[in-house]
Image (cartoon, rainbow, N blue to C red):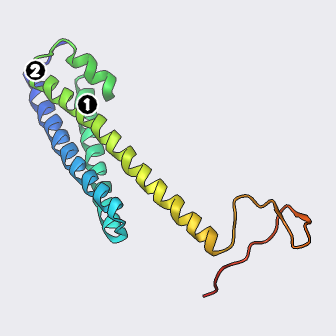
Amino acid sequence: MTLSAELQNPLSQILSSELDCARSLMEILQREHKALKSRDPDQVLSISREKQQAVEEMQGLARQRDHLLASFKIPGGTAGIKRLLQHDTDSVCSTLWKDLAEIATELREQNEVNGGILALSQRHNNQALDILCGRTHNRNTYGAKGQYNKEAPGHSLAKA
């Protein structure tokens, strides 16, 4: 299966748009990383909205690509485009697809790093709240007289 000019031109435009969007998403993820490290919740929230818009745009472009491929009786998704491009390794579309695959890997890795920072921050917040509210994860304690209390209630350190 080779790429006709009738397919290559619109496909290269979509892939180019996907690549631009992926690069923009990488910039957003890098800003999110900085905001997470600086613990700025307002900035994190603002950036998460931007990230959601960029992801939706990428999904829309992927749907356009799949629709274009389907109009040429080519299966959509990664499998279809790989099959289409396997014989046209020097085409513009092939280069764009390789670049897109590389940045997709980088996006996944950066998103996992950001998710790890967020999970760690949430765990620290939950631990601080547990301490302030007198909750422990291990509820096996002993009372004042040495008796074993499996579910002893916690005591808060302060009341608001």
Q: Which residue is mark 2?
A: 91
Count of numbered circles in the view = 2
Identify the secondary structure beneath mark 1: helix
Q: In the rendered view, does 8 fall on the left or right side of 119?
A: left
Tell me residue 90's x, y (percent): 10, 17
Please tell me which of labels 1 and 2 falls first in the chain.
2
Q: Which quarter of the rendering shows the C terminus?
A: bottom right
Cβ atoms at labels 1 and 2 below 8 Å apart: no
* 1 and 106: which is toward the camera: 106
Tell me residue 120's x, y (percent): 48, 55
Q: Which residue is mark 1?
A: 101
Q: Residue at x 82, y 68 (%)?
A: 152
Q: Residue at x 35, y 60 (%)?
A: 36
* 82 and 32: which is toward the camera: 32
Task: Count residues near mark 2 (Cα–Cα under 10 Å), then give few for <14, some for 14-19, many for 20+.
Answer: some
Mark 1 vs mark 2: in front: 1
Can residue 76 be seen here? The reply is no
* In the rendered image, the vertical position of residue 120 relative to residue 89, given as above or below: below
Q: Quadrant of residue 37?
A: bottom left
Numbered circle sitting on residue 69:
none
Identify the secondary structure beneath mark 2: loop
Q: Quadrant of residue 33?
A: bottom left
Task: Count residues near mark 1 (Cα–Cα under 10 Å), then give few for <14, some for 14-19, many for 20+.
Answer: some
Q: In the rendered view, does 11 fall on the left or right side of 144?
A: left
Q: Residue at x 28, y 58 (%)?
A: 34
Q: Which quarter of the rendering shows the N terminus?
A: top left
The amino acid type, in three-letter code, at marker 2 is: Ser
Tell me residue 9's x, y (percent): 8, 29
